[in-house]
Structure formats: C-alpha cells, structure tokens
Image: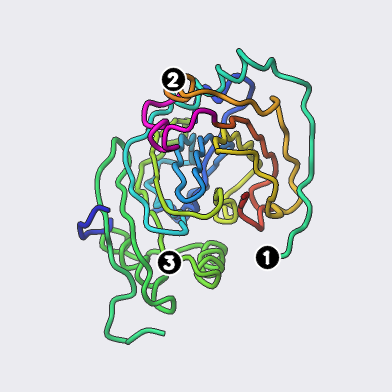
Amino acid sequence: MFKKSYLSVFLFLMFSVLIISDMGSVPYDPAAIIYEPGQHALIAWNGKTELLILVTDLYANTKTKILEVMPLPSEPVVTEGDSGAITRAFKILEEKNPRREYESLSLEDISRKSSHQQPPAIITFHEQIGAHNISVAKMLDKHRFIQWVQNYLRSDGIESPSIPPELVDVIRDYINDGYCWFAFDVIELGSQKASKDALQFVFKSDHVYYPLRITRTETGSTTIKLIVLSEKLLQNASNINRQAVIFPYEAISINLKELKRIDPQLPAFFDYKKEIMLRAWVIRGNLRNFSEDLIVY
C-alpha cells in the first residue's frame, strides 16, 4: 500500500447514452449543480480482492472545482486505469454472444470509540493521476470526520465550505455500516460534458462491491453499465431499491488468452485460472432513488 501524507468505462459502450460515476460530489461553488448522467466500470473479483476500473462523464451548470467522495470496504491501491479494457470486454461478448433483447429483473429484497487526541482521519495515499487529484483517507473518529472534510475544503481555498446535508447523511450511513476508507478526487468541471481519465482501485473485499448510495445526492437519471468478471456465476445480490437490472448478453466463459486481451494484468489477478465468467449488467434509475449499494457474491 502507498504511504504518503496529504489530502487533498467508454465507448460504453456500444449501445447507448452517456454516463457517470459512483462518487458523491461537493462543488466548490455552492450554487453549482452537478450532473452525472451515467456510469462505466469493469469489476473483476477473485473471491478475496476486487479490481475496479472507472470512467466517468461529468458536467456542471457552471465552471467549478468539485470534491468527489467514494466509500470503500478496505484500503485501496489507486492507479491509472485502462478504459480500453471495458471496450475490449464488450467486443468479446459481442463476438461470442450477439446481443439479445433486453431482459429485466428486479432484484429481490434481501435483509442484510476513539481517544479525543487522535486525528479524525489519516491520509495513506495522495497523488495526481492525470486530471485527478486523488487522496485515500482512513476515518478514525466518525464524530469529527465531516468537520475534517470541511477543513480540507477550507485548506484548498474555500472560505465557507458547505457539504450538502444529503451527502453528510449518506457518508454517516456508510460510517455507521462500518466503512472507514474513503477515496477523494478533486477535479475541475465546466458546462460541457467531459470524460475523466480512467482510475483503477484494487481493494480487499469478500463480495463484488459497487457504491450506489453515495450518488443519490446528485441530479437526474443515470445508466450504469458494468462489465463483471469472476471465477463463477454469482447468485446472491443485495437489494438496490428494486431498480431494473438488464442483461444485454448471456454470461460467457472466456479463456486466459481472451482474459489477457481484455487487460494483461487480469490473468495473474485470477491466478491463471483457465476459465473466467464474463457478463454485462445494466442498471437504470434516478440517482436519488439508490438507497443500497450493489453487493453480489
């Protein structure tokens, strides 16, 4: 893991609208409205570790910097991602499995103290990755963590930082659920939709994890397009507020050569297993309606 101290996907694809992210946003200009019309991601899960590649399209009604926040179940290693991996995965699906008519399925409901002297959080990683100013923080004191984020905004030139109450509530939900790792990303937005450079997060997880709750502070509807790679088909899914899940392709088995074609790092990630399952999921809905994260195992 990286140890420094400061705070600071796609043609996705071949079939449709533009998209965004898995992060909550704090605009430096309180009057700015952030739009996140979609999300692209590749998720690889080997049963113990998740590799997540993200590409996001964002815009605002006015020029502003924003601080994006993403909760994670464990400390991530953050590097530049390869958005082409998502494109190549879809090409393999298309070659081996022509797209079928959309089939929808609503996921079923599934029920699922510190010394005052320690800092509210510590920074374990900080780096500029393309247009991203990335920091990873471990929350130590849940009662002072929000204030700590506000102090960061103040240190970056915001005189009276204001975190939207909705985002404060969502962050507290994550903290109360045991999440203590957060990735922060500072970027500049304009009124024109733009794609950010791909980011890659690798972190320990005993399930497939994709944060959805954190986006419910944003405006408008979204289309989330996910490529999912795992050693076997996954049967159990969390409830995501009964949003429709679309399966544009049948799940397929791919070999090591095809896995390497998607991304050269993936064969080693899956310990060179001869066959890996590949499938695509599409989730649509209003950002404010996502009350649960996507958790599958």
In this view, the mark in front (3 or 2): 2
Which residue is pictured at 33% across the width and 56% down the height? 136
Q: Based on the displayed image, in which of its 4 quarters is residue 244 positioned?
A: top right
Q: Nearer the viewer, residue 282 or 145?
A: 282
Q: Nearer the viewer, residue 119 or 258?
A: 258
Residue 132 placed where, x, y %? Answer: 32, 42
Amino acid of disc 1: Arg
Secondary structure found at label 2: helix
Which residue is pictured at 61% across the width and 20% down the height? 93
Disc 3 to disc 1: CB gap under 8 Å: no
Magenta residues, start to end: 261-275
Q: Of marks 3 and 2, which one's residue comes earlier in the chain?
A: 3
Residue 237 placed where, x, y %? Answer: 68, 50
Classed neighbour count for the residue bearing mark 2: other residues with Cα under 10 Å, few (<14), some (14–19), many (≥20): some
Alpha carbons under labels 1 and 2: distance apart: 37 Å
Q: Of marks 1 and 2, which one's residue comes earlier in the chain?
A: 1
Residue 47 placed where, x, y %? Answer: 51, 48
Residue 159 vertical position relative to residue 98 in the rendered view, above or below: below
- Give the label on residue 261, or none: 2
Secondary structure found at label 1: loop
Report which residue position mark 1 lands on: 112
